[in-house]
Structures are given as structure tokens and as C-alpha cells.
Amino acid sequence: MKKIVPVIVLALLFAIALFNDSALELSPTWSWVVTILLGLAMVVVLILSMTGKMIERRIVFLFVGISLVLPFFMNFTMPLNVSPVVQTLYDALNKLPKGSKVLASFDYDPPSAPELQPMADAFVKWAFRNDIKVIIVGLWPQGPLQANLSVEAAMADPEIAAKNPKYGVDYVNLGFQTGNEFVIQGMGTSFRAKFPTDLYNTPYDSIPLMRGVENFSNIDFVMNLSSGYPGTVEWVQIAVDRFGVPVGAGNTAVQAPQVYPYVESGQLTGLLGGMSGAAEFEKATGEAGQANTFLLSQSFAHLVVVGFILIGNVALFIGQNRRRAPLV
Amino acid sequence: MKREIPLIITFVAGCVFVIQYFIPHWPFNEFEQVFTDWFSIVQAFAIWLGALSLLKFSMLKIQRRQKDWYMSVIIIVGFAVMVAYGAYDGFVGMNANPAYSFRDPGTHFDWLYQNIYTPLTSTMFALLAFFVASASYRAFRARNFQATLLLIAGILVMIGRVPVGDLITQFLPESYRAANLADWIMNPLNATGQRAIMIGIALGTVSTSLRIILGIERSHLEG
Amino acid sequence: MRVAKFTTPLAITAFLMVVLFGALQAQPDAIQRDSLEVATDSLSPMPAVAPLVKPVNPSAEDTPNDAGNSMDIAWELGSDDAARVTKYQVMRSESPDGPYEVVGETTQGQSKFTDNTVAAGVDYYYRIVAVSDPLGDGVTNFASAESDIIGPAVSTGQWFNTRRLNVLLWTLVLSGSVIFYIYRAKGGGNLYIRKIAGIDAIDEAIGRATEMGRKVFYVPGINDMDDVQTLASIAILGRVARLAAESDTYLEVPVSKSLVLITARETVKEAYSKVGRPDSFREEQVHYVTDDQFGYAAAIDGMVVRQKPATMIYMGAFYAESLILAETGNAAGAIQIAGTAQPAQLPFFVAACDYTLIGEELFAASAYLAREPMLLGSLKGQDIGKALFLASIVLGTILQLLGLDFQWLLRVS
């Protein structure tokens, strides 16, 4: 029974958060109260570990789960600074004249959506608002379908809906193509050869937006959203290095460190790294989205993890003194 | 000849692949794509081997009522349901006007994919949040100097990567605030380490590939 | 316990019924097809209100280092590019008198275009048309101006990519070093190799499994046989299988790819034969799970939680599932040895496993375990290559500080 209780508590919290939709929102005062209570609970854990009690991993899971869910009920706004790498990407996009064609490669699947979907939503909204043409492709099977979600989210914006971006004229979804980096290589020669039809089986030549688009030399910018292989590294190695087209990227927090060297060398024009990159991009573009709420969850979770790390070290030092270290 | 033929094929294919990288002229410019297409085709056929092997052993497990045999029931049922709906939607879609694929939005197969498979994979991925916490709690202990460095770097990066970090350290000069410290750790320090590891990996890859091409490394052929 | 015995199958049956019921009830939405209104798009320039400044100094040159099906077109922008031009059309013909067809377009401000649709050895003539079409209707305030005709331009294929000369040099140096030391090692003599704790621990880990009477799980990663990490993993698997066979410990190898299944099975079977225990090998020891990343992780986690192996060995390419596997193995109380050349996953393995082989140690493991002179010789050659890399980094840093450009030596095109 003891083992099931944390699971039930978490399941209930997750379920409420999922269906909440701002109906149950804590006021700023209560948000602070709940945060302080969470902090006090961690102090209790610290005291218990100092007395030599073993901290089960389920307790760690419970605290992490609560810290992830609570922000969905809160009304906190955190101050956010746009980092230089995000600003670089935004500035490069802003320099594109109206009517420019941007190739957006959606190279991720639903598990990575919490980090990358807010970036995608902000980008598509910004593109539609600024009359930038968007050509969507995917090197991952689910990528083009995630792109459709971003387009739907953009169309839900009244200002964008009033502009009435037309499929085939203002944006197009060419779908997924198998072949990993060879797709990018083939696109350097001919888009048509790699994507003979769009996602809905419309022939390439029947799509007005694709008229005159033969290869990368007809593209003004590539925006890549990726969570692994094939992804940003392949786009840099082939599209940038071989065909000279500027590429900006959004990556998951795990992949971002691998890609930083390309930003440093100038091969990559800006980088959105993880949830914080998504939130910064939303701030830079002015497109309000979910990244801020997700980032609040992430902030709470990070603090809880740091708290447990400190608790573990305090317990280690005390245990060493007592010649006993509580370990999970 | 059972061992010699694979070695010869490996040698020839390896040499061709190395040479084609430097020669842009036809037909060398097409080798990479052609060989990749061949591999994709072989891979596609080979999936049947794996799938049939999975089904065979699942059925044997059920038949012998071995431990956890009911897990094999789930495997077989899940396999059968997806294949059946995929085949049904594919057949119906092929004959529809306009024709559609079994993967298109709105099909039964797509419903199963979006409502069963996708939430399951997302759930597995979400486990990482909890596992990172428990792994950090267990691993980030200041047992020695290197572990202490790891601990401090880990804490700084975790705090610096979220806005809370700047909030906590806003009283410090800008270059010493959490976000900038985290960037400094990730860019010059982490990137340097990553590059060093990547150089080592590249050299290891060259060495291993040469051993395989020259037939010196044969474990994958003969155990 | 008795309750759990029945509730688990019941819960699973209920879940399956929900799946089937839900799938049967699913009403496929009408397949949405956006009908594209194909806009008529006249490409013929029409008389403009005020003439545009034509693009000047057009050039057409064979793209270097290609197969002969690409031409680089360039021109200088006219003075009214920023104010009036909306696009440039690149037109091509096989005769100077035409007819010309549009082969591509660029936007305002761009003065280059690569024509990737040429045939080698054929004479082509180009002209660049600056177009001002502010409303996009081809009529209102439409203006265009054509450049002079350029040509004949011929594209030819090159037999050597000169931009990869530096790569060729490094390839020859590194390969030469590795091959030299491989064959030098054949002549005998001891080659020193530093201690790698993770590989030494494999013996101990298998011994632990034997004493506890539990299984050894070997996970060869989730990439296919085209990845060198998987090949290195299979090489190590051969050695591990031999140790497991010698100590009569059950080795289980769940794989994610069918080609890996075939290779791994043969490798393990051969290892059992070599130690004289072919009858101890069972086919189900090496079994296919699923190609899907998280399905594979979930299946292995389930096996680990239920069977509680004594030893987990992860060798090969891993992605996000690395920590899921390692933490579950840790919770089950297994001793864990990991090795991968995925830099992003190394921190997770270092935090969760007892021993980790970092990057090139994975590739060295096979040679380390076998202790064959030729394999060890390749490691020495690899180390010489690394020394040369280090020297070039130091030299490059000095040259860069002195303001001398040397990047041609390292840039890969």
C-alpha cells in the first residue's frame, strides 16, 4: 500500500493538470504558499536523511512529479533574458525580406514535442505574421505531422487567420522522406527528385509555392528542429558546408551541447536549446506559447533535483562522520 | 570459402566507399546513394526475420507456459492488431477514390498509432525526468576532488539553464550570474571535452573500420 | 501475492479489450484533401511602366569538384535591386538564339544561382532577367530587364575533388600509421596498452553472475550493422560469449535490429562452439525485440525487473533510452558496464553504471580482450594519429595567433 500511494497521488495530480485548462489556478499568494510548503517538505527530507534514514528513490520521484505538475496550477511569470545564440537566430530570420522562402525541417517525434513543439509553433506563427513562405519537410516520419500541429496552432491566432495563409501558396508540407542525410544531399540537386509529391500526394509541379524552387539555391534559410539523428549535425555538414545555405536550429537540451561547436564556428546561424531556448524564442518573436509554463515546471524540477543532490551530500558527510552513508 | 567470400566483399566494398568520396565523376558520385538504397532494401526484408523470430519464440513461450508467458500474449495480440488494421486500411485505401495510404490521418491504423503507440513512447521518454533525478541524487556526491568538480558544474548548469538561476544570482555582476556561468561551462569547457572525445571516436572509427576492411577483425563473422 | 497473480493478467486483458474496442469504434475522419487552386502564373515578362536596370557582368562557370551536372551562375545587382526588384529569373538555352526556359529563380539581393540540371559536355547559354512584380499578378507595375547572353558554358565532371585534398592527406597518414603498426606487430614484440578498468571488469562481472546463478544481459545498442559502434559491440560480444560459455552462465542478448539478430546469434553460437559447448547454446538467447527505440527500452526494462540479472553490459550506440536502461539495471542490483561512442549519452552512463568505456575505448575493447598483436598494433597506429592531431592543434593555434591562415588543412568540404 505504501508503494502505491505516491503513484496514486502523482496520477491524480497529472490527470488534474491535463484537464485543468486554467479552471483551477492558484493566485500568486497561494502559489507562493505551495512553493514554500514544497520547500519545507524537502527540509523534512533533509532532517530525516541527517538522522540516518534511507531516502527511497520513490520519494525522489514523488517530489519531482509534484514539482513538474504544480506550475500548471500557478500564475507565476519568470523574468527571462534572450541569450545571444537565440538572438542570433532571431536576427537572421528578421533580416529575411517578405516573400522569402524558408525550408523548415521537422526532424522529431512526439516524445520530443514538449521541447520542440513550442519552438515550432513560435516559428510558424512568426513566419505567417511576417509573410515568409514556409516549405515543410521531415527526415523523421512523424515530423511533418508535428508541423501540421504547428500550422493549426498558428491558424487559431485571429490575426494570422485574418491574413488567411493559403496551402500551396504561403506554405506547403512536402512530407517525410526516408534516407537520412542522403535526402539533404539529394535536395542540393533537386527538391523534386526527393519530394515528387507533397504530404497529400499533390504533384510537385502543381504546387505554386514550389515553382522555381529547384534546390537549396532557391531557398533563403533553413530552420531545422531536431532531437537526434538525422538532424542538425547532418544539416550543417551537408546543407551549410556543401551547399552554402544558412541554417538555424532548435534542439533538445540533450543534443544542444553537441551542436554548440557549430554555433561557435559560425556554421550554424543561431540555436534554440531545449525548453529555455523555446521560451527565449517565444519572447524574442513575441509569440506567447506553452514554453513559459513548461519552463516553470522545469525550473521547479531543477531546484528539487539540486535540493536532493545537496541533501545527499549533507547525508554523505554526516554519514562519513558516523562511518555510515545512507545510499539508495 | 564460407569465410573468404564475406571478407572479399567487405574489402572491395570498403575500398570502393573510400575511393568514391574523393572522385565526384560518374559513376563514383552515385555509389553512396546506390549502396545506401541497397542497404535499405536488405534492411526492409530483414525485418521479417526479426518479426518472425519474435512471433516464433513468443508462441513457444506460451505453448510451454514459461515464466511470464502472458507477456508473449500481449506481443502477439499487439502485433496482430496493428498488422490487421494496417492491411485493412491499406486495402480499402487503395481502392478508394481518391486513394489514400493506411498511414494517412483518419485511418484505424493512424488512430492506434496516435492514441496507443504515441502516448506509450512519450511515457517512456517522460521517465527520463525521474531517472535523471534519482541518478543525480545517487551520483553527484563529493567523494573526491573530481566528483566535487562534477557536482559543482552540475548544480551550476542546472540552475543556470532555467530563469530561476538569474533570479537567485541577480545581485552578482552579470558575467558571474548563473546563466552566464552555465554558458561558460557548456561552451568553452563542455564543448572542448566533447570535441576531444569526438576526435578520439573518429580515430577509433578509422582504426576499427580499417581492421574490418582488411579482415583483421573477424569477430562478427566467426565469433 | 496470490491476488497479484490474477490481477496482472486481468488488468492486461482489460487493457487489450479497451484497445480493440477503441480501435473498432474509431471512426476514420473523412480524408481531408486540400484542393490546391493552381494559380496561373505567366512567366513571360510584359512591358513595364519604367525600365529596370539590367543585371550586369553575368557569368556562367562550371561548378568545380562535381560530376559535371552543375553550373554556377553569378551577376552583379543593378542599382535598383533593393528598391524595385522582386526576383531574378535564370533562363537557359542550348542555342544563343533560344528558345530560353526558366531554370530557377532567386529573390531580391541575391546574385548567385547554381543550375543543377545541366548535362555534362553540352553548350549552354544563359541570361538573367530582373523582374519587378510588386503585386505578384504579372501585370500591375510589372517590369523586367534582361542581362546580356552568356555562353557557351560547358559543365564537365572532375576526377578528383580538390576540396578534399586535406582529407585525403589525413586519410593516408592515419591509415598508413594504423596499417604500418598492424603489420609491424606481426613481427612480434610486446605492445603496451594501458589498463582499462571497464574491460577488466567484464571477467569479474560474469563471474558474479555465475556465483549468483543469474543471467548476464548484453545489450548491443539500437543501431544497425551499418554503424561501426554495432560492429565493435559484436566483436566484444564474441569475447563475452566465450567467457559466459566457459563459466556456463546464461547470456541473454536482446537486439533491436534484424541484421544484428543474425550476426549476434552466429557470433554467440560460434563462441559456444569454440569452447566446446555447442549444445549449451540456445537460439532464444539472442532474440529480436523491436526496432522501436522506446519499445526496446521498455522490453528490456521489463525483463530486467522480472528476471533481475546479475550483470548488464551495454555496448554500442544508444540514444535517449540509455539512462532508462541504466537506472532500471541499477535498481535491480546488477553490476553494469557500458560503452558507447555517443558523446551525449556518456554522462548518463557514467552517472548510472559502475564502469563506462568512453568513446574510443569501445573500439579498443575488442583488441584489449583478444590481446592479439595485430589488433593491438592498430591501437598503436591510432595513438600515433592522435599525436599528430594534437601536434596540428598546437601548430594551428600558434599559426592562428600569428595571423596565418591554415584552415585549408582542416576544413572538410
Image (spheres, coloured by chain):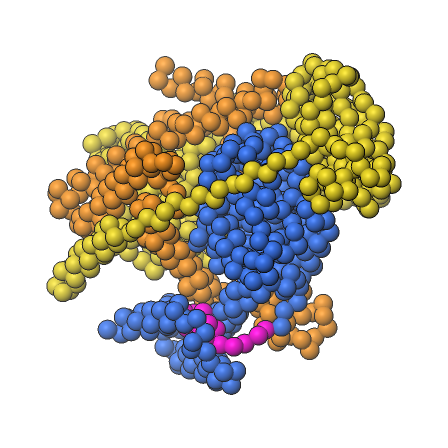
Chain colours: A blue, B orange, C yellow
Residue A182 x, y percent position in the rendering: 54, 33
Residue sitting at 54 percent across and 76 percent down?
Answer: A76
Q: Residue at 65% across / 51% down in the picture? A: A131
Left or right side of B198 for A301: left
Segment colored magenta: A63-78
Q: Is residue A119 left or right of residue C169?
A: left
- The correct choice, above or below, for A308 with respect to C54 in the image is below
x and y, in percent, of residue B182 in the image: 63, 63
Viewer-nearest residue: C259 or B75: B75
Towards the viewer: C8 or B182: C8
Above or below for A187 versus B124: above
Give the image quarter of residue A274: bottom right
Q: Residue at x 62, y 75 (%)?
A: B167
Q: Nearer the viewer, residue C329 or A8?
A: A8
Image-quadrant location for residue B77: top left
Q: Position of residue C48 (x, y in %)?
A: 80, 37
- Nearest the viewer among A256 and C114 is C114
